[in-house]
Image (cartoon, rainbow, N blue to C red):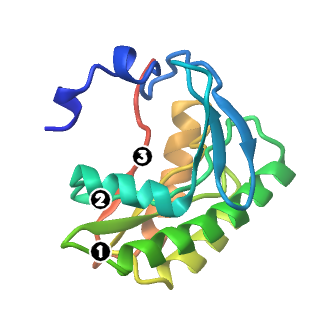
Amino acid sequence: MLAGSLDLDRDVGLKGAGGKKRPNLVKRTTEDGVTFQSYRDGALVTLTPESSVAAQKKLGADIIIPFDQLLPYNASPEEVEHSLHLSHRWEERSLAAHRADPRGQAMYSVIHGGTDQALRKKSIDHLTALPFDGHAVGGSLGKTREDLFELLRFVLPRLPSDQPNHVLGIADP
């Protein structure tokens, strides 16, 4: 198992989901991708949709998650909508990279839109029309458990029932 072979605090310097504090290593986000600063040596590293897919393929992932942008729950409506469209473009590029060399691996879309139902519906309509193998509910899922449950009550019935559906980033602090 991949997770068992990594000491994420030592090897990556980040904590996982569940509200753990992590340093902000993102230096720049553009249409091309995201530039991070290495916590080890300060070098700048750019991750693109294509390089993200390549890395997951190299690791032998069974399910590949396309490159997307995760905003905090308190992002402005304008930021959420901009991020939704950027994530859709990145997901389309990720899907193209994946389909060029599927290797028997699956790729799930990541449904975005924060807690805004109209944006979630826009994301569902856009991404379920593309040839993903399944779908994940991602992005900001709200601040409280009730926010999460309300979001899932809206989103899950709108996802295809003939494909796998998954919720990303669920954890308690």
Q: Earlier in the sequence, mark 3 or mark 2?
A: 2
- Spatial separation of the CA atoms under disc 1 and disc 2: 21 Å
Where is residue 61 drawn, in percent x and y?
Answer: 24, 54
Determine the residue positioned at 84% across, 44% down: 76
Which amino acid does the dot numbered 1 rest on? Answer: Gln
**Does residue 37 sit above or below 141 in this rendering?**
above
Residue underneath mark 2: 57
Task: Give the residue type at disc 2.
Answer: Lys
Left or right: residue 103 versus residue 70 is left
- Which of the 4 quarters of the picture holds residue 97? bottom left
Q: Give the number of the mark in front: 1 or 2.
A: 2
Q: CA distance from mark 3 to mark 2?
A: 19 Å
Residue annotated with mark 1: 163
Secondary structure at badge 1 equals: loop
Total numbered circles: 3
Residue bearing mark 3: 168
Residue 78, position in %: x, y? 86, 53
Q: Position of residue 147 (x, y in %)?
A: 59, 40
Residue in the picture at 75% in, 35% down: 74
Element at badge 2? helix
